[in-house]
Image (cartoon, coloured by chain):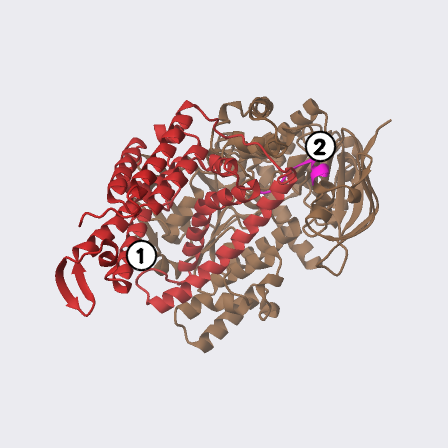
Amino acid sequence: MAQEILSFIERKSPVHSLSGATKLIIFILYSTAAMLTYDTRVLLGLLVISIAIFIVSKIRIREIGFIMAFILAFLLLNNIAIYIFSPQEGVKIYGSSHVLFEIVGRYNVTLEQLFYHLNITLKYFVVIPAALLFIVTTHPSEFAASLNKIGVNYKIAYSVSLALRYIPDIQRDFRTIAQAQQARGIDISRKEKLLKRLKNASSIIFPLIFSTLNRIEVISNAMELRRFGKKKNRTWYNEKPFRKADYIVLVAGSLILVLSLVITFYDGSRFYNPFL
Amino acid sequence: MRKPIIEFKNFSFKYKSQMEPTLHQVNLTIYEGEKVVIVGPSGSGKSTLAHCINGLVPFSYQGEIEGNLTIKGQVTKSLDLFSLSKIVGTVLQDPDGQFIGLSVGEDIAFSLENEAVPQEKMISQVVDVSKLVNMEDKIQSSIHELSGGQKQRVSLAGVIVEEVDILLFDEPLANLDPATGEQAMALIDQIQKETNTTVIIIEHRLEDVLTQDIDRVIVVNDGRIVSDRNPNELLASNVLESCSLREPLYVKALKYAGCKVTPEMHSASIETLVLDESKDKLFEWYEATIPATYEKKDSPILELQDINFSYHKGFPTIQNVSLTIHKGEMVSIVGTNGAGKSTLSKLICGFEKIQSGKILYKGEDITEDTIYERSNRIGMVMQNPNHMISKHMIYDEVALGLVMRGVPEDEIKKRVEETLKVCGLYGFRNWPISALSFGQKKRVTIASILVLQTEVLILDEPTAGQDLRHYTEIMEFLTELNSQGVTILMITHDMHLMLEYTSRAIAIADGQVIADNSAVNILTNSEVVEKTNLKVTSLFELAVKAGINKPIDFVSRFIDYDKEARVTWRKKY
């Protein structure tokens, strides 16, 4: 069976039982905090909480391995780019320069620059679990409901969740089409040269687009015939009502945001400077 | 006095994108509480007629309307899609495509959600309606876990969860096997009685629809209504034949035997059928028809030896399957959805790897061959041609496999043109594929496999969703190929196809071969029929009813006779 990327993983855990809207709000609060602060102490604190929540959710790392690897690769790229374009960023921020070794010209390695990169990396690690957990622990049916609850127009919310929901179907179509084309001698495996592979891939993409368009026509007729879009508001069969745990989590989340901002801006700078 | 609920008055409709009107001057009245079936060949306008009733025409598919359509006293032009859908509930053809919710409960609740019904009320309404369709145990289940028949129940529940006056079914039986189809019809009947709605069914499997009482059958052809009467009268006429629609097999048998079918014979169902003096005629015909003899084929081309396969450990999909296909045979593989017949074809083509066992091609072990290597010997035609077609022009599409194999250009040209001639597509070779009908597209996909000169052809549901004309076209073409020596395997649950075209059928249930016999023997064996969700053919029941002592022989003689008759019929047109 095709591996499904970023789809709901069914478990019984406190994280799963929270309302989708709660998880979405927490994700937003959490990323705001992580985005604003460069304070290493705050980031470390947030990281510990992130990891704790991740463990509580009973999701295993390998279940989200593919997307994790993808994000980590992106993180590496980001770090390299920062160093290439701004090797003295750390020195500028922290106001001192502890050179470890020189490379060439303005490119040297300083403790300050390494510390700056550590902070960037920490930010990623704080946000990743929050974002992934929202997606993999929220049932797709509840997904739209939770977007709608925080004020997103329900038509947009519904299309987002429909798109997510069709990923497995489209993957299945892709597999069928790929098999049919391989049987005619079209190779898209690694044995073929890259350029040829890309060209061959187009013979799968076109049927895939057509079958997807067809799918869209059917579903939009089905939705209209059952009066989707008639009213300004709609209710949700699968919406989880807010319970005590949701309120507690939301209050805790807001406190964490406030606290982290207070610590961050207490001394007038977003950065924690260990070099003073 | 019956109260009209749907009234077409001199109604014509032309799609925006088309030159000619699809419906011409339709006059039709449907009364409250009636159960009406609309039949017609593909492209006859029957789906358009349905779309006019549910409002997709003109609100989703735009075009010009002449004349009037009144539903429940209101002219539809002045309404909108939403208010119409409050009166007319539609169950669409494709059971998978129309699901919006992921779980049974969510899907049933969809229209309630859109009406902003509070959650609690919604949940209790869903429970009520799921009881009505016997799905109350499955409310939490995911749609993907359901069988075809259960899916149909859910889509029906989603429509009747709010009160509607008219229920419209667009080809409800298209994706169901015969036994499930019969249950679906029984359910429609039950719902109609309990809710007292008007029911309109668009379908071309007339014999299956008529298993329940139907008030009227409306025949549409070329955008016009050509017949509007009760089933008994319709079957006594020759309207179906002249519109190239399929008559129930037992009616055909009666006609072959020279019996005059009259409305008084109640031929709408084999159960109500009154034979009386027709009995003798049937008997005479039976005695006079000489059974055909078949030469036994005995040169194995494809052998499966003790094949095992599972997608998930511990849940075998295919178990100890062994079978031999001989050169020049035409065989159908039958079984319920999920019995493993599609998996079997994937194993033969190498799309999936077998876990134990051996596959031999002309005695040579091909178990380790790749998809590509096998594709030179065994061709696979998928059910949905849109999954295969990737080029714009017909010529390019058919040439694709050869181009990929690096065959020299002049040879490609020669082989493609030859194949196109065989497939009756030579005249279209420079046409874009988008201009073709579904049946023609199917032929393009067959051509694109044939051009690779495979000796074995596997087709997955070659005739699904085709009307009698296209069905005959495709099947006659396959028979022609078969007579030229191509071995053909077909995965199907179409009983007509089995009976009429394949002398041998292999029945699969739970991943095992449960019968490997002549199609006639399989369709008259009640045990196999039950396990594969087929139905005992009505011909058999007719023979029993007529008191013929060897009903199986009667069925096979009918098939032979019918084959001859079809050859002459084909020459005539």
Measured as percent of width and height from the top left, residue B562 is found at 64, 47
In depth, the one of A173 and B234 nearer the eye is A173
Horizontally, residue A191 falls left or right of residue B419, namely left
Q: Secondary structure at mark 1?
A: loop
- The type of residue carrying mark 2 is Lys
- Judging from the image, mark 2 belongs to the subunit labelled B
Can you see residue B9? yes
Horizontally, residue B119 falls left or right of residue A51, namely right
Measured as percent of width and height from the top left, residue B37 is found at 72, 38
Span colored in magenta = B82-94
Q: Which label is found at residue B279?
A: 2
Tell me which numbered mark, 1 or 2, is placed earlier along the sequence. Answer: 2
- Foreground: disc 1 or disc 2: 1
B83 inside magenta stretch: yes
Identify the residue shown where x is 41% and y is 41%.
A28
In depth, the one of B68 and B235 nearer the eye is B68
Identify the residue shown where x is 42% and y is 23%.
A244
Chain assigned brown: B
Chain A, which colour? red
What residue is pinned by disc 1? B369
Identify the residue shown where x is 56% and y is 26%.
B119
Measured as percent of width and height from the top left, residue B386 is found at 53, 55
- The type of residue carrying mark 1 is Asp
B191 inside magenta stretch: no
Asked if marks 1 and 2 touch (Cβ < 8 Å), the reply is no
Can you see residue B377? no
